[in-house]
Image: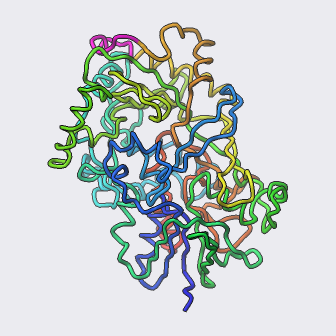
Amino acid sequence: MTIEYDYIIIGAGSAGCVLANRLSADSSKNVLLIEAGPEDKSALIHVPIGIALLSRSQQLNWQFDTEPESELHNRRLFWPRGKASGGSSSINAMIYIRGHKADYDGWAALGNKGWSYEDVLPYFIKSESNQVIKNNPLHGNDGPLTVEKHRTVNPLSDIFVEAAKDAGHKKNDNFNGKEQEGVGRYQVTQRNGERCSSAKAYLTPVLSRTNLKVISAAHATRVIFDGKKAVGVEYSKDDSLITADINNSGEVILSGGALQSPQLLMLSGIGKKEVLQRHNIPLVHELAGVGKNLQDHLDITIMHKAATKDSIAVTPLGIARGALATVDYIKNRKGFLTSNVAESGGFVKSDAGQKRPNIQFHFLPTYLKDHGRQVMLGYGYTLHICDITPKSRGSISLKTGNPLDDPKIEAGYLTEDEDWTNLINGYKLGREILNAKSFSNYSRKELVPGIQVETDEQIKEDIRQRAESIYHPVGTCKMGSDVLAVVDDKLRVHGVQGLRVVDASIMPNIVAGNTNAPTIMIAEKASDMILGKSYYY
């Protein structure tokens, strides 16, 4: 007997795992979750320091590349995305950041009812099990997503915080509290010294539910329509095309992320007419905004050669430390194997005219070159400097009409002058911190780019040569009611029935910070919408 599902979810990533959990809680509903990647069995996922190798994994990482970026010397930038249960929450740096209050108030101001900060805060709280901050009205302590402090902290990470204070920045022990601005240690999505991905938090605990079916290593190829009503999904599994159907009141939910949700919409006949015609895809409904409004955080690094041997390093001593740390991890779940590497950082204003922080720092007590794909020998440390309120916009489109091919990514970095100004100013602020008094006994010299890069034009040229994504693409299935909107404020795709998008692609504007926690919040809120719970507003 063929099952007709109540919900078919495409993508077991940060959002899809939440949906699978919440929607299958009603045992009368049949839920199908389809994931293109494997199950999250790899130790590289679960041992936090494994992040250092995940950028190289073709099995667990889509390893996308952009088209040549015009403002970055036509370089193709590397865009890692998670390819396993948990999606990018299985390969990210595990930093728990919600963004700024103004982000969500801005979404609501665009006409998206129910998406202000006060509206979304209950869903952040619902999702969170914070082991650091107890009995605080802004935080949850019994949600599925465990948030902890680092079990072991490299001394250089705290030196960064002290140096930032030397440079005039205040300390902040909770970036998700009343104020975002300041510097400090990050809280991380870990549990007992292991990564707490969306899969571990939401999916693994409910895999025994008989009304939830999870199919891994299955690539969705299109949504099937009867007229303008979604009626099922076609997917590729073991070189065969298979169809799964929804019942009359059922829904298909796309949770493939900011790259693959718009790609699948276009492959299914929803998008700009000219794009679909180019690839011989029959038009189901024209939505010009599909794939538009792409936003991402662009990042530039400064590296110092260390004067001490505190950093995580590829050296004989570093390898010996690694062996000892492995024992410590197995016995105690402590040591640097529990590190997400980006242990400290913060949020600052690029200049006095900014109303809120627009620069984010991630400090790493190690060298980082080419996303970790190239090894640098010796002792050093790296500061990532990121513009978190970019005005530049790009797009996702189709390279071909083959569902198994990569999407076409045109990030559009630095096409707005304001983004140049802010990133250059952030670069200078980062350099001030690394040259501050607290670092005086820890630095031999600025290794990259080097002190010869000094003027604004030289800094600009360095950014053109070296800036990279910090992996926060959003916005390509924009929520709203304007000409480029793809979904309404209940995340239903405009112009069709039985189809929603629930993931980071629905963000009208990018949040000021890491995007995993906001994506989980979106899915928590969407679950209540789909289930018709009256309190989601």
Q: Furthest-bottom residue in view? A: 1
Quarter of the view holding residue 433 = top left
- The x and y percentages for residue 39 are 42, 63
Type of colouring:
rainbow
Total labels: the figure holds 0
Q: Check the image and report above or below for 249 versus 13.
A: below
Q: Is residue 441 magenta?
A: yes
Q: Is residue 152 magenta?
A: no
Quarter of the view holding residue 123 = bottom left
Q: Check the image and report above or below for 433 versus 127.
A: above
Image quarter hosting the N terminus: bottom right
Residue in the picture at 59% in, 49% down: 107
- The x and y percentages for residue 61 are 50, 50
Q: Is residue 479 left or right of residue 328?
A: right
Q: Is residue 160 left or right of residue 37?
A: left
Q: Furthest-left residue in view? A: 331
Residue 138 shows in the view:
no
> Relative to the observer, which residue lies in front, 390 or 291?
291
> Relative to the observer, which residue lies in front, 535 or 317?
317
> Relative to the observer, which residue lies in front, 278 or 504?
278
Residue 33 shows in the view:
yes
Residue in the picture at 15% in, 49% down: 331
- The x and y percentages for residue 382 are 40, 25
- The x and y percentages for residue 292 are 71, 48
Specify the segment rendered in magenta.
434-445
Residue in the picture at 25% in, 34% down: 153
